Amino acid sequence: MTARTLPKNIDIAIIGAGTQALTLVTHILQKKTKFRRRLLVLDPSGSWLTQWRHQFAAQEIPYLRSPAVHHPHPNPHALRKFAEHRQDELFAPYDLPGTHLFNDFCTNLVKNCNLDELIYPDAVTRILPIESSHGRRFQLNLESGQLLQARRVVLATGTGIPQFPDWVSKINTPYPRERLLHSRQIDLRTLKLTRERILIIGGGLSSGHLTVGAIARSAKVVLMSRRELQEKLFDADPGWLGPKYLKGFNHELDWEKRWQMIQTARNGGSMTPAMMLQLRRLTRDGKLKIEEQCEVIQARWQNHQWQIKCQDGKNFFCDRIWLGTGANLSVENYPLLTDILDTHLTPFVHGLPILDEYLRWSSLALFMMGGLAALQIGPVARNLAGAIKGSQRISKALVKPSLAIS
Protein backbone atom coordinates (compact mmCIF):
# COMPACT_ATOMS: atom_id res chain seq x y z
CA MET A 1 0.00 0.00 0.00
CA THR A 2 1.31 3.44 -0.87
CA ALA A 3 2.12 5.87 1.89
CA ARG A 4 -0.40 8.59 2.64
CA THR A 5 -0.21 12.13 1.30
CA LEU A 6 1.37 14.67 3.63
CA PRO A 7 -1.33 16.82 5.24
CA LYS A 8 -0.70 20.40 6.32
CA ASN A 9 -1.95 19.69 9.84
CA ILE A 10 -2.17 16.54 11.95
CA ASP A 11 -3.23 15.83 15.50
CA ILE A 12 -0.49 13.31 16.42
CA ALA A 13 2.88 13.07 14.64
CA ILE A 14 5.10 10.13 15.59
CA ILE A 15 8.75 10.48 14.62
CA GLY A 16 10.34 7.12 13.88
CA ALA A 17 8.92 3.78 12.69
CA GLY A 18 10.77 1.32 14.91
CA THR A 19 9.49 -1.07 17.56
CA GLN A 20 8.66 1.74 20.00
CA ALA A 21 6.51 3.58 17.44
CA LEU A 22 4.81 0.40 16.19
CA THR A 23 3.93 -0.59 19.76
CA LEU A 24 2.51 2.87 20.45
CA VAL A 25 0.35 2.91 17.31
CA THR A 26 -1.20 -0.49 18.06
CA HIS A 27 -1.96 0.59 21.64
CA ILE A 28 -3.57 3.86 20.48
CA LEU A 29 -5.75 2.06 17.92
CA GLN A 30 -6.77 -0.55 20.47
CA LYS A 31 -8.09 2.23 22.71
CA LYS A 32 -9.63 4.39 19.94
CA THR A 33 -9.87 2.99 16.41
CA LYS A 34 -11.08 6.35 15.07
CA PHE A 35 -7.69 7.86 15.98
CA ARG A 36 -6.30 6.25 12.82
CA ARG A 37 -7.14 9.40 10.83
CA ARG A 38 -5.42 11.56 13.46
CA LEU A 39 -2.05 9.76 13.24
CA LEU A 40 0.95 10.28 11.01
CA VAL A 41 4.23 8.37 11.33
CA LEU A 42 7.32 9.99 9.82
CA ASP A 43 10.31 7.87 8.87
CA PRO A 44 12.78 8.34 5.98
CA SER A 45 12.56 4.65 5.05
CA GLY A 46 8.82 4.82 4.45
CA SER A 47 8.30 1.43 6.12
CA TRP A 48 8.11 -0.15 9.56
CA LEU A 49 11.14 -1.53 11.46
CA THR A 50 13.61 -0.83 8.63
CA GLN A 51 16.52 0.00 10.96
CA TRP A 52 15.61 -2.81 13.37
CA ARG A 53 15.59 -5.40 10.57
CA HIS A 54 18.85 -4.05 9.15
CA GLN A 55 20.68 -4.24 12.48
CA PHE A 56 19.57 -7.80 13.18
CA ALA A 57 20.55 -8.91 9.67
CA ALA A 58 23.83 -6.95 9.65
CA GLN A 59 24.97 -8.55 12.92
CA GLU A 60 23.41 -11.93 12.06
CA ILE A 61 21.45 -12.05 15.32
CA PRO A 62 19.54 -15.35 15.37
CA TYR A 63 16.97 -14.53 18.03
CA LEU A 64 15.84 -11.77 20.38
CA ARG A 65 16.91 -11.28 23.96
CA SER A 66 13.32 -10.47 24.99
CA PRO A 67 10.79 -13.24 25.75
CA ALA A 68 7.80 -13.97 23.51
CA VAL A 69 5.38 -11.88 25.60
CA HIS A 70 7.23 -8.67 24.64
CA HIS A 71 6.28 -7.45 21.18
CA PRO A 72 4.32 -4.58 19.54
CA HIS A 73 0.86 -6.25 19.66
CA PRO A 74 -1.32 -5.16 22.63
CA ASN A 75 -2.18 -8.81 23.36
CA PRO A 76 0.85 -10.35 25.13
CA HIS A 77 -0.10 -13.84 23.85
CA ALA A 78 -0.33 -12.81 20.19
CA LEU A 79 3.20 -13.84 19.21
CA ARG A 80 2.92 -17.29 20.79
CA LYS A 81 -0.36 -17.83 18.95
CA PHE A 82 1.28 -16.72 15.68
CA ALA A 83 4.11 -19.20 16.35
CA GLU A 84 1.72 -22.11 16.96
CA HIS A 85 3.19 -24.06 14.01
CA ARG A 86 6.71 -22.64 14.36
CA GLN A 87 7.60 -23.78 17.87
CA ASP A 88 11.17 -24.53 16.80
CA GLU A 89 11.65 -20.75 16.36
CA LEU A 90 11.01 -20.08 20.06
CA PHE A 91 14.29 -20.52 21.91
CA ALA A 92 14.80 -21.59 25.52
CA PRO A 93 14.55 -20.24 28.09
CA TYR A 94 11.40 -18.07 28.15
CA ASP A 95 10.56 -18.67 24.46
CA LEU A 96 12.90 -16.10 22.92
CA PRO A 97 11.55 -15.44 19.40
CA GLY A 98 13.76 -16.19 16.41
CA THR A 99 14.54 -13.11 14.30
CA HIS A 100 12.65 -14.39 11.24
CA LEU A 101 9.64 -15.31 13.38
CA PHE A 102 9.54 -11.89 15.04
CA ASN A 103 9.89 -10.09 11.70
CA ASP A 104 7.12 -12.19 10.14
CA PHE A 105 4.91 -11.53 13.16
CA CYS A 106 5.41 -7.75 12.84
CA THR A 107 4.85 -7.87 9.06
CA ASN A 108 1.58 -9.71 9.68
CA LEU A 109 0.56 -7.17 12.35
CA VAL A 110 1.25 -4.23 10.02
CA LYS A 111 -0.67 -5.89 7.17
CA ASN A 112 -3.71 -6.89 9.24
CA CYS A 113 -4.02 -3.41 10.75
CA ASN A 114 -3.20 -1.55 7.51
CA LEU A 115 -0.45 0.35 9.29
CA ASP A 116 1.65 1.02 6.19
CA GLU A 117 -0.84 3.69 5.21
CA LEU A 118 0.07 5.69 8.33
CA ILE A 119 3.70 6.26 7.27
CA TYR A 120 4.97 9.24 5.34
CA PRO A 121 8.50 8.69 3.89
CA ASP A 122 10.46 11.71 5.06
CA ALA A 123 12.88 12.68 7.83
CA VAL A 124 12.10 15.33 10.42
CA THR A 125 14.99 17.79 10.66
CA ARG A 126 13.56 20.27 13.17
CA ILE A 127 10.80 20.50 15.81
CA LEU A 128 9.66 24.07 16.50
CA PRO A 129 7.06 24.94 19.15
CA ILE A 130 4.80 27.67 17.68
CA GLU A 131 1.63 29.57 18.51
CA SER A 132 -0.98 29.29 15.75
CA SER A 133 -4.58 30.38 15.26
CA HIS A 134 -5.52 26.92 16.57
CA GLY A 135 -3.42 27.28 19.73
CA ARG A 136 -0.05 25.82 20.61
CA ARG A 137 1.37 23.59 17.90
CA PHE A 138 4.64 22.12 16.63
CA GLN A 139 6.07 22.92 13.24
CA LEU A 140 7.97 19.96 11.83
CA ASN A 141 10.52 20.78 9.16
CA LEU A 142 11.09 17.84 6.82
CA GLU A 143 14.17 16.91 4.83
CA SER A 144 12.20 17.35 1.61
CA GLY A 145 11.62 21.00 2.49
CA GLN A 146 7.97 20.50 3.36
CA LEU A 147 6.39 21.73 6.60
CA LEU A 148 3.87 20.00 8.83
CA GLN A 149 1.99 21.32 11.85
CA ALA A 150 1.15 18.86 14.62
CA ARG A 151 -0.81 19.38 17.83
CA ARG A 152 1.07 16.60 19.60
CA VAL A 153 4.42 14.95 18.84
CA VAL A 154 5.98 11.69 19.96
CA LEU A 155 9.74 11.26 19.57
CA ALA A 156 10.26 7.52 19.09
CA THR A 157 13.73 7.44 17.56
CA GLY A 158 15.24 6.56 20.94
CA THR A 159 18.37 4.42 20.36
CA GLY A 160 20.76 7.28 21.08
CA ILE A 161 23.90 8.53 19.35
CA PRO A 162 26.77 6.02 18.79
CA GLN A 163 29.34 6.46 21.56
CA PHE A 164 33.06 6.46 20.77
CA PRO A 165 35.83 6.19 23.39
CA ASP A 166 37.89 9.34 24.01
CA TRP A 167 41.03 7.89 22.42
CA VAL A 168 39.31 7.73 19.02
CA SER A 169 39.22 11.53 18.70
CA LYS A 170 42.94 11.65 19.57
CA ILE A 171 44.11 9.41 16.71
CA ASN A 172 46.60 11.64 14.89
CA THR A 173 47.36 9.40 11.90
CA PRO A 174 45.06 9.24 8.85
CA TYR A 175 43.35 5.85 8.43
CA PRO A 176 40.82 4.25 6.07
CA ARG A 177 37.35 4.90 7.45
CA GLU A 178 36.25 1.28 7.22
CA ARG A 179 39.13 0.20 9.50
CA LEU A 180 37.53 1.72 12.62
CA LEU A 181 33.77 1.36 12.95
CA HIS A 182 31.06 1.48 15.58
CA SER A 183 28.93 -1.67 15.79
CA ARG A 184 26.01 0.19 14.17
CA GLN A 185 28.14 0.84 11.07
CA ILE A 186 29.09 -2.81 10.49
CA ASP A 187 27.31 -5.14 8.11
CA LEU A 188 28.83 -8.61 8.37
CA ARG A 189 27.09 -9.68 5.17
CA THR A 190 29.29 -7.39 3.08
CA LEU A 191 32.67 -8.38 4.54
CA LYS A 192 35.42 -10.82 3.59
CA LEU A 193 37.71 -11.18 6.59
CA THR A 194 39.88 -14.22 5.90
CA ARG A 195 43.06 -14.09 8.03
CA GLU A 196 42.31 -10.54 9.21
CA ARG A 197 43.00 -9.59 12.82
CA ILE A 198 40.11 -7.75 14.44
CA LEU A 199 40.01 -6.01 17.81
CA ILE A 200 36.44 -5.83 19.11
CA ILE A 201 35.95 -3.54 22.10
CA GLY A 202 32.96 -3.85 24.44
CA GLY A 203 31.34 -6.29 26.83
CA GLY A 204 27.79 -6.20 25.47
CA LEU A 205 25.85 -8.62 23.32
CA SER A 206 26.57 -6.69 20.09
CA SER A 207 30.28 -7.35 20.62
CA GLY A 208 29.48 -11.03 21.05
CA HIS A 209 27.50 -11.23 17.80
CA LEU A 210 30.24 -9.39 15.90
CA THR A 211 32.87 -11.73 17.36
CA VAL A 212 30.96 -14.83 16.26
CA GLY A 213 30.30 -13.33 12.82
CA ALA A 214 33.92 -12.31 12.25
CA ILE A 215 35.29 -15.72 13.25
CA ALA A 216 32.74 -17.40 10.96
CA ARG A 217 34.46 -15.42 8.20
CA SER A 218 37.87 -16.82 9.19
CA ALA A 219 39.08 -13.76 11.08
CA LYS A 220 41.20 -13.88 14.24
CA VAL A 221 39.56 -11.86 17.01
CA VAL A 222 40.64 -10.21 20.25
CA LEU A 223 37.60 -9.29 22.35
CA MET A 224 38.49 -6.57 24.86
CA SER A 225 36.46 -5.37 27.83
CA ARG A 226 37.25 -2.77 30.50
CA ARG A 227 36.01 -5.21 33.14
CA GLU A 228 35.25 -8.91 33.39
CA LEU A 229 32.51 -10.04 31.01
CA GLN A 230 29.12 -10.13 32.72
CA GLU A 231 26.84 -13.11 32.08
CA LYS A 232 23.11 -12.29 32.29
CA LEU A 233 20.07 -13.70 30.53
CA PHE A 234 18.49 -10.25 30.18
CA ASP A 235 20.15 -6.84 30.22
CA ALA A 236 18.11 -5.96 33.35
CA ASP A 237 16.67 -8.28 35.98
CA PRO A 238 13.07 -9.43 35.18
CA GLY A 239 12.07 -7.89 38.53
CA TRP A 240 12.17 -4.54 36.73
CA LEU A 241 9.19 -5.58 34.61
CA GLY A 242 6.81 -5.50 37.56
CA PRO A 243 6.29 -4.22 41.11
CA LYS A 244 9.22 -6.17 42.60
CA TYR A 245 11.64 -3.35 41.75
CA LEU A 246 9.43 -0.73 40.07
CA LYS A 247 7.46 -0.04 43.23
CA GLY A 248 10.54 1.29 45.01
CA PHE A 249 11.72 3.02 41.82
CA ASN A 250 8.42 4.87 41.39
CA HIS A 251 8.34 5.91 45.05
CA GLU A 252 11.84 7.41 44.79
CA LEU A 253 11.39 11.17 44.35
CA ASP A 254 15.09 11.97 44.01
CA TRP A 255 15.76 11.85 40.26
CA GLU A 256 19.51 11.48 40.77
CA LYS A 257 18.87 8.36 42.84
CA ARG A 258 16.55 7.03 40.15
CA TRP A 259 19.30 7.50 37.57
CA GLN A 260 21.71 5.61 39.82
CA MET A 261 19.20 2.77 40.19
CA ILE A 262 19.04 2.51 36.38
CA GLN A 263 22.84 2.35 36.09
CA THR A 264 23.06 -0.31 38.80
CA ALA A 265 20.31 -2.39 37.20
CA ARG A 266 21.78 -2.34 33.69
CA ASN A 267 25.37 -2.42 34.97
CA GLY A 268 26.85 -1.78 31.54
CA GLY A 269 26.76 -4.38 28.78
CA SER A 270 26.39 -8.11 29.35
CA MET A 271 26.43 -11.39 27.45
CA THR A 272 23.73 -14.05 27.54
CA PRO A 273 24.69 -17.52 28.85
CA ALA A 274 24.28 -18.90 25.30
CA MET A 275 26.68 -16.29 23.91
CA MET A 276 29.24 -16.89 26.66
CA LEU A 277 29.14 -20.61 25.82
CA GLN A 278 29.97 -19.80 22.19
CA LEU A 279 32.78 -17.46 23.18
CA ARG A 280 34.36 -20.05 25.49
CA ARG A 281 34.28 -22.64 22.73
CA LEU A 282 35.90 -20.24 20.27
CA THR A 283 38.58 -19.44 22.87
CA ARG A 284 39.29 -23.14 23.40
CA ASP A 285 39.58 -23.60 19.64
CA GLY A 286 42.22 -20.85 19.47
CA LYS A 287 40.09 -18.59 17.26
CA LEU A 288 39.40 -15.99 19.94
CA LYS A 289 41.38 -14.28 22.66
CA ILE A 290 39.46 -12.49 25.42
CA GLU A 291 41.18 -9.59 27.17
CA GLU A 292 39.25 -8.57 30.27
CA GLN A 293 39.98 -5.58 32.51
CA CYS A 294 41.89 -4.07 29.63
CA GLU A 295 41.45 -0.62 28.11
CA VAL A 296 42.91 1.09 25.04
CA ILE A 297 44.69 4.40 25.66
CA GLN A 298 46.15 5.00 22.20
CA ALA A 299 45.74 3.80 18.61
CA ARG A 300 47.91 4.59 15.59
CA TRP A 301 47.43 3.57 11.96
CA GLN A 302 50.86 2.74 10.62
CA ASN A 303 52.14 0.43 7.88
CA HIS A 304 48.58 -0.56 6.94
CA GLN A 305 47.69 -1.80 10.42
CA TRP A 306 46.62 -0.58 13.83
CA GLN A 307 49.12 -0.28 16.65
CA ILE A 308 47.22 -0.43 19.92
CA LYS A 309 48.56 0.59 23.31
CA CYS A 310 46.65 -0.42 26.46
CA GLN A 311 46.49 0.97 29.96
CA ASP A 312 48.15 -2.13 31.43
CA GLY A 313 51.12 -1.85 29.06
CA LYS A 314 49.98 -4.48 26.56
CA ASN A 315 50.35 -3.80 22.85
CA PHE A 316 48.26 -5.17 20.00
CA PHE A 317 48.48 -5.12 16.22
CA CYS A 318 45.32 -5.58 14.17
CA ASP A 319 43.72 -4.83 10.82
CA ARG A 320 40.37 -3.51 12.07
CA ILE A 321 38.84 -2.06 15.22
CA TRP A 322 35.15 -2.57 15.93
CA LEU A 323 33.51 -0.67 18.77
CA GLY A 324 30.63 -2.23 20.69
CA THR A 325 30.62 0.78 22.99
CA GLY A 326 26.92 1.53 23.05
CA ALA A 327 25.06 4.79 22.60
CA ASN A 328 24.90 8.15 24.32
CA LEU A 329 21.38 8.87 25.55
CA SER A 330 21.31 12.58 26.26
CA VAL A 331 18.80 15.23 25.23
CA GLU A 332 21.73 17.54 24.50
CA ASN A 333 22.89 15.19 21.73
CA TYR A 334 19.55 15.02 19.90
CA PRO A 335 19.49 17.66 17.13
CA LEU A 336 15.68 17.45 17.00
CA LEU A 337 15.50 18.75 20.58
CA THR A 338 17.74 21.80 20.04
CA ASP A 339 14.86 24.27 19.60
CA ILE A 340 12.88 22.67 22.43
CA LEU A 341 15.82 23.11 24.80
CA ASP A 342 16.18 26.75 23.72
CA THR A 343 12.55 27.66 24.38
CA HIS A 344 11.23 25.07 26.86
CA LEU A 345 14.18 23.88 28.91
CA THR A 346 13.22 21.08 31.27
CA PRO A 347 15.37 19.68 34.10
CA PHE A 348 17.41 16.62 33.19
CA VAL A 349 19.72 14.24 35.05
CA HIS A 350 22.85 13.02 33.27
CA GLY A 351 21.19 13.85 29.97
CA LEU A 352 17.84 12.18 30.72
CA PRO A 353 14.85 14.55 30.82
CA ILE A 354 12.51 14.66 33.80
CA LEU A 355 9.16 13.90 32.17
CA ASP A 356 5.67 13.70 33.67
CA GLU A 357 3.99 10.35 34.31
CA TYR A 358 2.74 10.24 30.70
CA LEU A 359 6.32 10.71 29.39
CA ARG A 360 5.54 14.27 28.40
CA TRP A 361 7.99 17.16 28.28
CA SER A 362 7.27 19.85 30.86
CA SER A 363 4.39 22.11 29.68
CA LEU A 364 4.47 20.70 26.12
CA ALA A 365 2.51 18.02 24.27
CA LEU A 366 5.83 16.42 23.33
CA PHE A 367 6.30 12.79 24.38
CA MET A 368 9.51 10.74 24.67
CA MET A 369 9.89 7.01 24.03
CA GLY A 370 12.81 4.64 24.44
CA GLY A 371 15.90 5.40 26.48
CA LEU A 372 15.02 9.07 26.94
CA ALA A 373 12.03 7.99 29.07
CA ALA A 374 14.13 5.92 31.48
CA LEU A 375 13.63 8.16 34.54
CA GLN A 376 9.93 7.28 34.41
CA ILE A 377 9.94 3.77 32.89
CA GLY A 378 13.10 2.39 34.52
CA PRO A 379 16.07 0.42 33.16
CA VAL A 380 14.00 -1.49 30.52
CA ALA A 381 12.87 1.75 28.81
CA ARG A 382 14.81 1.14 25.59
CA ASN A 383 13.69 -2.51 25.26
CA LEU A 384 10.46 -4.03 23.92
CA ALA A 385 9.18 -4.23 27.52
CA GLY A 386 9.83 -0.49 27.81
CA ALA A 387 7.99 0.13 24.53
CA ILE A 388 4.93 -1.57 26.01
CA LYS A 389 5.11 0.35 29.30
CA GLY A 390 5.70 3.64 27.49
CA SER A 391 2.86 3.02 25.04
CA GLN A 392 0.41 2.34 27.84
CA ARG A 393 1.21 5.70 29.43
CA ILE A 394 1.38 7.81 26.27
CA SER A 395 -1.71 6.31 24.60
CA LYS A 396 -3.73 7.09 27.72
CA ALA A 397 -2.73 10.76 27.56
CA LEU A 398 -3.36 10.97 23.81
CA VAL A 399 -6.88 9.53 23.76
CA LYS A 400 -8.24 11.01 27.01
CA PRO A 401 -9.24 14.68 26.49
CA SER A 402 -8.89 15.51 30.21
CA LEU A 403 -5.16 14.70 30.08
CA ALA A 404 -4.41 16.97 27.11
CA ILE A 405 -2.16 20.03 27.28
CA SER A 406 -3.79 22.86 25.32
Image (cartoon, rainbow, N blue to C red):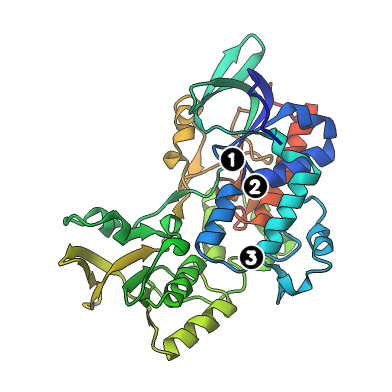
* Residue positioned 33% across, 72% down in the render: 198
Q: Secondary structure at mark 1?
A: loop
* Image coords of residue 89 (percent x, y): 72, 71
* Image coords of residue 162 (percent x, y): 42, 52
Q: Which residue is mark 1?
A: 16
Q: Quadrant of residue 61?
A: bottom right
Residue toward you, 18 or 265: 18
Q: Is residue 72 visible?
A: no
* Horizontal arrangement in the rendering, residue 4 relative to residue 345 (left or right): right
User: Up-down: is 153 above or below 65?
Assistant: above
Residue toward you, 92 or 195: 195
Q: Which residue is mark 3?
A: 64
Residue toward you, 105 or 31: 105
What amino acid is found at the position of numbered circle 3 in the picture? Leu
Residue toward you, 34 or 228: 34
Local packing at callout 2 (Cα closer than 10 Å; few below 14, some 14-19, many 20+) is: many
Q: Are marks 1 and 2 in contact (CB under 8 Å)?
A: yes
* Image coords of residue 154 (percent x, y): 62, 35
CA gap between label 3 and label 2 equals 15 Å
* Residue positioned 71% across, 43% down in the render: 24
User: Up-down: is 285 above or below 214?
Assistant: below
Q: Quadrant of residue 195?
A: bottom left
What amino acid is found at the position of numbered circle 1 in the picture? Gly
Q: Which residue is mark 2?
A: 20
Q: Secondary structure at mark 2?
A: helix
What amino acid is found at the position of numbered circle 2 in the picture? Gln
Q: Quadrant of residue 91?
A: bottom right
